[in-house]
Image (cartoon, rainbow, N blue to C red):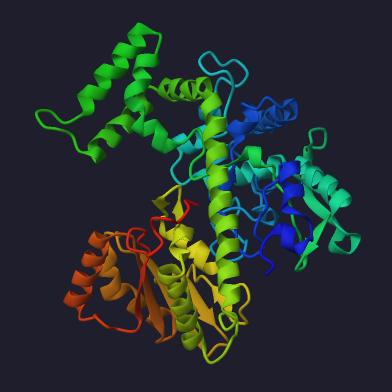
């Protein structure tokens, strides 16, 4: 079954591994991101130069940001970029089409450049400027937007990296010379230039490879969650005693008196302190710079985990399912097909050691997004259209399986530990049915412990759903399987 780059372009995964590229899926985006800190902190001179190139472009934008009346067309030209969907990374649960960098990002960056990078080239606390500082200041700017912006600014390198591999390892009939927009920035004409590249070509578009050592999963090294969780360490690192005392005094003053503050109150106090003393951000970033070696190790572990989860385990799962010859046959309507696939998947997980595919180093994968991606990748051989409705007016549906306008079925995936499970079972899918004009919906619940099973059964009894065929429970426990004591850890 063709799922990965190596499958479609007939190259050995070992060749990709030796080249240092991630073996992406051409069925679905994977939640990996380019982390600019890994460029800054790299031992490779070419990566450090890429980071410097990013800063050069930010310096250019910063100079232009002083013009509050800058022509909107120039803002669009300099700030707006499409998602580089050809690398097959990001948040898209179906396919590889993401939102890219839209007007809100452009306006936010344009307005905040002087505040964020006021000491460009003359940093006194940090060793360098970092694009990620924007996500610390501006809400709604997360790892996806930072990764998209970084990828666009190093796109020329990614294109050349992919072309070099393709020309040496991929048959000519599987490649195509393509014109690519916004490849490099010309500082004399102040405009983006295009280029032509000989690249792997599939399903009407080119495909890009990305080096594994600039990728991470979950969060980037410099991120808002770490800033807030590690805040208590930051004042201690402030060398200026007077500033340290002022920061500590202000932080204490905005916390509630005579009672233990809630998490929300602590976060509010931290935000307020950062607003009063912006240098806090620089001291946080400096601490991340000083711990850069761990950034490389952590990112490497995350990428290895992603390879295990999205490549090795999916290959094992698809091989198990392939042996069930009727799994990949399409028959009946989408409702029957969806139920049949879930029945087979349930049997594989519960009775054929398939549960192991939902564990990494003995720990269960208890994130709904990960389970949804794993499930999506089992539909690659179906004639049905597998889609995620992202804007139907009522909220997103995990999956909409359709075959024409008159035959569609909704599939909702939930973890038993989800705190909103009861409310979801009671209301959510029924709401989505109305929004998507379908009356066929299946709820799938994964549970990983006896406690979670008891919780689900309690909810189902309360809602009168015990025995309902459209509520499918999947037992992913590892301690109740016949071969559990002998099963290897994946």
Q: Which residue lies furthest to the right in this view?
A: 172
Q: Position of residue 226 (x, y in %)?
A: 41, 34
Q: In this view, does 48 lie to the left or right of 400?
A: right
Q: Residue 203: percent from the left, percent from the top? A: 75, 68
x, y percentage for residue 62? 62, 30
Residue at the farthest left position: 258
Q: Looking at the image, which is closer to me, 412 or 17?
A: 17
Evaluate whether residue 106 shows in this view.
Answer: no
Q: Which of 361 and 487 is in front in this view?
A: 487
Q: Left or right? Give the position of 155 relative to 249.
A: right
77 in relation to 300, above or below = below
Which quadrant of the view contains residue 11?
Answer: bottom right
- The answer to whether residue 36 shows anywhere in this view is yes
Q: How many marks?
A: 0
Left/right of residue 213 with respect to residue 428 in the rendered view: right
Which residue is rendered at x = 62% and y = 72% of the image?
380
Q: In this view, does 152 lie to the left or right of 286?
A: right
Q: Which residue is drawn at 27% across and 83% down?
A: 467
Q: In this view, does 151 lie above or below 10?
A: above
Query: Is 90 rendered above or below residue 248?
Result: below
Rendering coords of residue 177 (x, y %) = 88, 57
Image quadrant occupied by the N terminus: bottom right
Determine the residue positioned at 55% across, 37% down: 299
């Amino acid at each position: 079954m063709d799922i990965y780059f190596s499958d479609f372009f007939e190259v050995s995964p070992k060749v990709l591994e030796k080249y240092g590229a991630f073996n992406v899926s051409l069925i679905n985006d994977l939640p990996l991101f380019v982390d600019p800190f890994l460029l800054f902190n790299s031992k490779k001179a070419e990566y450090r130069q890429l980071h410097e190139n990013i800063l050069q472009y930010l310096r250019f934008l910063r100079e232009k940001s002083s013009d509050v009346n800058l022509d909107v067309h120039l803002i669009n030209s300099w700030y707006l970029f499409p998602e580089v969907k050809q690398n097959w990374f990001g948040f898209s649960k179906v396919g590889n089409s993401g939102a890219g960098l839209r007007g809100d990002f452009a306006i936010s960056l344009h307005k905040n450049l002087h505040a964020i990078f006021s000491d460009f080239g003359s940093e006194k606390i940090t060793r360098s400027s970092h694009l990620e500082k924007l996500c610390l200041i501006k809400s709604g700017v997360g790892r996806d937007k930072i990764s998209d912006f970084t990828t666009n600014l190093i796109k020329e390198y990614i294109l050349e990296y992919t072309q070099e591999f393709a020309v040496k390892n991929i048959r000519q009939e599987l490649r195509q010379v393509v014109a690519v927009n916004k490849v490099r920035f010309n500082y004399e004409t102040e405009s983006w230039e295009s280029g032509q590249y000989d690249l792997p070509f599939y399903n009407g578009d080119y495909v890009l490879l990305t080096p594994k050592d600039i990728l991470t999963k979950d969060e980037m090294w410099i991120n808002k969650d770490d800033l807030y969780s590690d805040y208590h360490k930051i004042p201690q690192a402030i060398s200026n005693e007077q500033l340290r005392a002022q920061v500590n005094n202000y932080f204490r003053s905005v916390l509630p008196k005579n009672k233990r503050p809630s998490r929300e109150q602590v976060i509010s106090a931290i935000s307020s302190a950062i607003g009063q003393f912006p240098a806090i951000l620089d001291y946080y970033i400096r601490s991340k710079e000083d711990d850069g070696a761990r950034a490389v190790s952590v990112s490497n572990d995350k990428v290895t985990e992603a390879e295990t989860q999205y490549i090795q385990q999916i290959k094992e799962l698809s091989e198990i399912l392939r042996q069930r010859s009727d799994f990949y046959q399409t028959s009946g309507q989408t409702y029957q097909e969806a139920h049949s696939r879930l029945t087979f998947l349930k049997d594989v997980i519960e009775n054929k050691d398939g549960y192991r595919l939902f564990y990494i180093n003995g720990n269960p994968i208890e994130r709904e997004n990960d389970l949804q991606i794993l499930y999506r990748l089992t539909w690659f051989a179906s004639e049905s259209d597998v889609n995620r409705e992202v804007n139907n007016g009522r909220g997103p549906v995990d999956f909409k399986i359709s075959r024409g306008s008159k035959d569609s079925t909704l599939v909702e995936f939930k973890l038993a530990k989800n705190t909103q499970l009861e409310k979801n079972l009671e209301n959510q899918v029924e709401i989505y049915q109305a929004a998507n004009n379908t009356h066929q919906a299946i709820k799938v619940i994964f549970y990983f412990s006896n406690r979670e099973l008891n919780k689900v059964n309690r909810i189902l009894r309360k809602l009168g759903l015990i025995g309902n065929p459209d509520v499918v429970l999947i037992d992913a426990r590892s301690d109740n399987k016949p071969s559990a004591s002998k099963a290897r850890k994946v």
